[in-house]
């Protein structure tokens, strides 16, 4: 798991948050888009 976080944080540092979001969207199944949006917006509150 540490390796996964290292990879994600490395990508975040090198390419910025938008690249990380774009990569996640490409891998996320379409049927989970609404659920992911709901969770992400709930984390803001």
Image (tube, grey):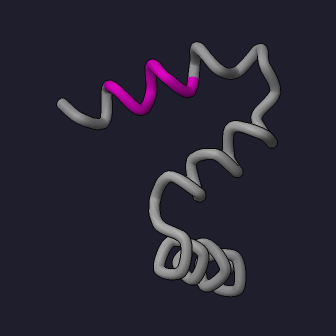
Where on the picture, by quarter, is residue 28? top right
Image position of 19 with respect to 27: above or below = below
Q: Where is residue 42 in the image (x, y as percent from the top left)?
A: 31, 26
Image position of 36 with respect to 18: above or below = above
Residue at 67%, 80% (x, y): give it: 7
* 28 or 18, nearer to the observer: 18
* 18 or 39, nearer to the observer: 18
Image position of 10 with respect to 21: above or below = below
How many callouts does the rendering have?
0
* 3 or 19, nearer to the observer: 19
Q: In this view, does 15 lie to the left or right of 26?
A: left
Residue at 78%, 39% (x, y): give it: 26
Instruction: Look at the image and say whether residue 42 sits in the magenta stretch.
Output: no
Q: Is residue 41 left or right of residue 11?
A: left
Where on the picture, by quarter, is residue 30? top right
Residue at 58%, 18% (x, y): give it: 35
Q: In this view, does 26 lie to the left or right of 38?
A: right
Image position of 6 with respect to 20: above or below = below
Q: In this view, does 43 lie to the left or right of 12?
A: left
Q: Position of residue 38 (x, y in %)?
A: 45, 19
Q: Main secondary structure of the magenta part?
A: helix
Task: Assign the N terminus to one quadrant of the image.
Answer: bottom right
* Magenta stretch, residue numbers: 36-41
């Amino acid at each position: 798991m540490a390796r996964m976080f290292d990879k994600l944080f490395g990508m975040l540092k090198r390419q910025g948050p938008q690249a990380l979001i774009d990569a996640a969207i490409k891998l996320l199944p379409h049927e989970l888009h609404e659920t992911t949006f709901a969770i992400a917006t709930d984390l803001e509150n």
